[in-house]
Amino acid sequence: MPHPSLSRRAFAAGTAALLAAPALHAQDIRERQLRFAFSLAKDHPLGLGAQRFADSVAQRSGGKLRVNLFPGAVLGSDMQNLSAVRGGTLDFTSMATGIVASLDKRFMLFDLPFLFNTPQEAYAIADGAAGTQLQADLAPHGIVGLGIWDLGFRHMTNSKRPIARAEDIAGLKIRVIGSPIFLDLFNALGANPVPMTFGEVYGALESRAIDGQDNPLGVIESAKFAEVQKYLSLTRHVYTGMPFMMGKKTWDALNEAERKVIREAADEAKQFERQAVQRKEGESIDALRKSMQVNEVSAAEIKRLREKVQAVTDKFAREVGEPLVQQVHAELARLRGGQ
């Protein structure tokens, strides 16, 4: 049996070491100003998540690391932000998986129509083996993946008519993300897809250069699309994840203590942002109902939509790669109790 005084001395030494560790950790962190740019509004859940990240970084670093936010596409479009992060002139950004697919087409996995039934399924894939590997494989493109945040399930708005049946989409000029899968998806539905950066969408809707667009409810509300759109149809046709990315040039310039701060703050902000998206869904639809005509789309019509775009799903599943798609379907089956 250990001598009591030895035990007390060991405990005291251990406690002292624990108390000293944060001080040593803080000494390793250098003063830095970092920049985080994104296209969405600062009051959107992603903007709130970005603020949580900035606050957490400051708190964890004792104020030495400062993250300055640039919401609303003030530094440029998503593609410009992506290029700047890769080039080392911007430190952080977040954007839809469909845009990140311009670097690695396997990110189109998340854009496969009607793949996920719930946000929790999408989170499980994003945080699991598939999502982790996809993010790790961004390193050769000059990017460090820090988690996949949530944008939500996409719905359609337009200024012409409610979309209650698959045929109602025919002929509508719909803004889409500049991604092949979105172009093919809306072509298959009979629409006229128009690729456009997010910052241009409101003006194009207002001028009637386009009839509509698709986005999650929180984006539709925060972007004030209700001011220029009459109809909102709850189609839930695609889930959109938002990879949170850091430039590898910035990452490589950090020491281990600084990287630990960034990773821990990113994990905290991811969970916070996802929860904010889920809370915002209900609030947004209640707010949008006050100024838009909102309609549910029946399960039978969702089934018809799924059937109309099956060829698109099959085509891009092959481009993503059958092994990865099969891995994800197997995990979804397990989550749904299919195994």
Image (tube, rainbow, N blue to C red):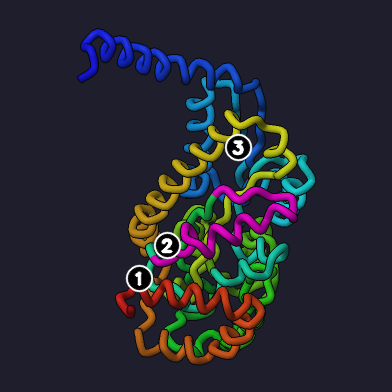
Q: What distance separates the C-alpha of mark 2 from that of mark 3?
A: 28 Å
The x, y position of residue 77, in whole percent, is: 71, 53
Q: Do we see residue 226 in this rendering?
A: no
Q: Earlier in the sequence, mark 2 or mark 3?
A: 3
In the picture of the structure, the residue carrying the numbered disc 1 is: 335
The x, y position of residue 339, in whole percent, is: 33, 78
User: Helix, strand, or loop for circle 2?
Assistant: helix
Which residue is drawn at the image coordinates 45% and 71% (left, top)?
232
- Which secondary structure is most common in the magenta stretch? helix
Q: Name the side, left or right, on which 139 lies relative to 262.
A: right
Q: What distance separates the C-alpha of mark 2 from that of mark 1?
A: 9 Å
Which residue is drawn at the image coordinates 26% and 15% (left, top)?
7
Q: Are marks 3 and 1 in contact (CB under 8 Å)?
A: no
The x, y position of residue 325, in whole percent, is: 54, 77
Q: Are marks 2 and 1 in contact (CB under 8 Å)?
A: yes
Looking at the image, is 273 positioned above or below residue 259? below
Q: Image quadrant of residue 178?
A: bottom right
Q: Earlier in the sequence, mark 2 or mark 1?
A: 2
The x, y position of residue 242, in whole percent, is: 55, 57
Which residue is drawn at the image coordinates 77% and 40% (left, top)?
89
Which residue is drawn at the image coordinates 69% and 65% (left, top)?
104
Residue 17 among those drawn in magenta: no
In magenta, the rendered stretch is 121-146
In the picture of the structure, the residue carrying the numbered disc 2 is: 124
